[in-house]
């Protein structure tokens, strides 16, 4: 029963994707190689901040060699997802540059750069009203207990069964989603 919201969200996403009526994959589909056989990916003095300037990362200096395994670790809200978005070209640096084999990746060819990556991001969508398993308002005592257990009591502001501050990091949103599951 707790997984029902996730399943319904997946069904909605699946239905939207089906509307595209994409052609089935064929091995002969052209796959342009704008950056064949690259050996190093480098972030040089890269900085990024969100539009509301509530959070920023950088300057980041990082060199990744082809085939190298990289783990991004850190606390919630520390910038792991933002760094992943920068690395994959989904966010553009505000300053600094991204280089492949020492050559800057041009803003004119972002699609070619993005094709180098296969990424799955687990975005969580939160609604402001807290509901229990049967769709009724959530038990306030249980909510407080679980917020304390998930170490989110100081991060989440509630008023009359509603979340007042939805500006949370992705990791924090996942914890709230756990609370509601």
Image (cartoon, rainbow, N blue to C red):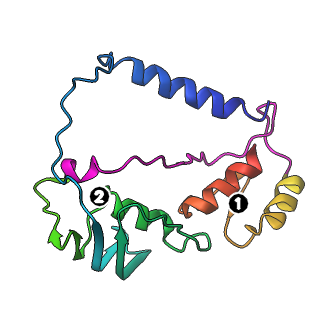
**If the image is split into quadrants, where does the C terminus sit?**
top right
Q: Is residue 123 magenta?
A: yes
Q: Which residue is mark 1?
A: 158
Could you tell me which secondary element the residue under label 2 belongs to? loop
For the stretch drawn in magenta, the main secondary structure is loop
The residue under label 2 is 89
Above or below, 6 against 98 in this view is above
Total numbered badges shown on the rendered structure = 2
Residue drawn 36% across the image and 78% down it:
62
Percent position (x, y) of residue 178? 73, 50
Q: Is residue 11 left or right of residue 27?
A: right
Of residues 24 and 167, the one nearer the viewer is 24
Labels 1 & 2 near each other (Cβ < 8 A): no
Residue in the foreground of this view, choosing between 22 and 70: 70
Please state if 94 lies on the left or on the right of 107 as rendered. right
Q: Nearer the viewer, residue 40 or 156?
A: 40
The reply to whether residue 66 is in sight is: yes
Q: Which quarter of the figure is the N terminus placed in?
A: top right
Q: Tell me the quarter of the picture where residue 141 sits.
A: bottom right
Q: Position of residue 44 (x, y in %)?
A: 27, 80
Check disc 1 and report its element: helix, strand or loop. strand
* Earlier-in-chain disc, 1 versus 2: 2
Q: Quadrant of residue 125?
A: top right
Residue 164 visible, this orientation: no
Residue under the point 78% across and 35% down? 2
Provide the residue span drawn in magenta. 111-139
Q: Does residue 42 sit above or below 157 in this rendering?
A: below
Q: Is residue 141 left or right of residue 21?
A: right
Residue 173 image point, x, y percent: 61, 56
């Amino acid at each position: 029963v707790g997984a029902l919201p996730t399943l319904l969200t997946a069904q909605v996403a699946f239905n939207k994707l089906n509307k595209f009526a994409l052609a089935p994959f064929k091995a002969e589909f052209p796959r342009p190689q704008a950056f064949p056989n690259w050996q190093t990916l480098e972030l040089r003095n890269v900085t990024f901040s969100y539009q509301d300037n509530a959070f920023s990362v950088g300057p980041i200096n990082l060199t990744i060699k082809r085939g190298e395994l990289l783990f991004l670790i850190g606390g919630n809200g520390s910038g792991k997802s933002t760094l992943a978005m920068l690395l994959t070209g989904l966010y553009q640096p505000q300053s600094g540059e991204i280089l492949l084999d020492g050559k800057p990746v041009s803003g004119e060819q972002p699609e070619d750069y993005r094709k180098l990556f296969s990424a799955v991001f687990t975005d969580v969508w939160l609604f402001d009203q807290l509901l229990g398993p049967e769709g009724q308002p959530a038990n306030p005592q249980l909510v407080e207990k679980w917020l304390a257990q998930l170490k989110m009591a100081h991060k989440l502001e509630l008023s009359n069964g509603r979340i007042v501050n939805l500006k949370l990091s992705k990791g924090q949103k996942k914890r709230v989603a756990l609370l509601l599951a």
